[in-house]
Image (cartoon, rainbow, N blue to C red):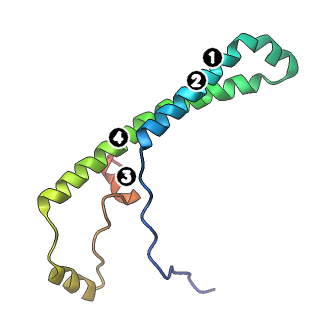
Amino acid sequence: MAKWTPTHEAPEPLEGPIVPTIIGGTILWFVLFLAQLPFYGWFDDHGHLWWLWTCLAGSGLGLIGIWYVRGRDAALKRMAAEAAAQGPAPAAEWRLLSTRGISPPRPPSSPRRIFRALGG
């Protein structure tokens, strides 16, 4: 079986207001938990107690998500500032590197660079 290689570059990920989105989702999960809490007995009687714990788990995982996306956002801003300070590389240098089979570095929004910037 032949090894599959992509024929085109992967598109850049869409960026948006990630931190407010995660915060909003976390608040929503916690509000749902609080709204269901008065009906604990009914959920327990009908075997739907997992609904309550799902909302609590969603809000807990949301807190981890907030910590992660805030760190990611700070790393992206830090890398963008470093790239702006260094300035763009000359086109001739990129052509020389490409003849040796070395591709130019990925933009700061690539998952590998974000992982490295977060300390991974």
Looking at the picture, which amino acid does disc 2 mark?
A: Phe
For marks 4 and 3 on the same chain, the one whose residue lies earlier in the sequence: 4
Looking at the picture, which amino acid does disc 1 mark?
A: Leu
Secondary element at image label 4: helix
| Residue occupied by mark 1 | 34
Q: Quadrant of residue 37?
A: top right
In space, the residues marked 4 and 2 are separated at their CA atoms by: 22 Å
Q: Which mark is residue 77?
A: none
Asked whether the residues under the numbered discs 1 and 2 touch, taking CB atoms below 8 Å apart as contact, a structural biologist would say yes
Q: Residue at x 33, y 46 (%)?
A: 118
Q: Could you tell me if residue 65 is visible in this image?
A: no
Q: Which mark is residue 115?
A: 3
Q: Could you tell me if residue 9 is visible in this image?
A: yes
Asked whether the residues under the numbered discs 4 and 1 touch, taking CB atoms below 8 Å apart as contact, a structural biologist would say no
Task: Judge the density around disc 1: few (<14), some (14-19), many (≥20) Cα neighbours within 10 Å.
Answer: some
Q: Quadrant of residue 14?
A: bottom left
Vertical side of 35 occupied by 51: above or below: below
| Residue occupied by mark 4 | 71
* Left-right relation of 100 to 93: right
Q: Residue at x 49, y 82 (%)?
A: 7
* Left-right relation of 3 to 69: right
In space, the residues marked 4 and 3 are separated at their CA atoms by: 10 Å
For marks 4 and 1 on the same chain, the one whose residue lies earlier in the sequence: 1
Vertical side of 27 occupied by 18: above or below: below
Task: Judge the density around disc 4: few (<14), some (14-19), many (≥20) Cα neighbours within 10 Å.
Answer: some
Q: Residue at x 31, y 64 (%)?
A: 107
Q: Which mark is residue 30?
A: 2
Q: Quadrant of residue 36?
A: top right
Q: Nearer the viewer, mark 2 or mark 3?
A: 2
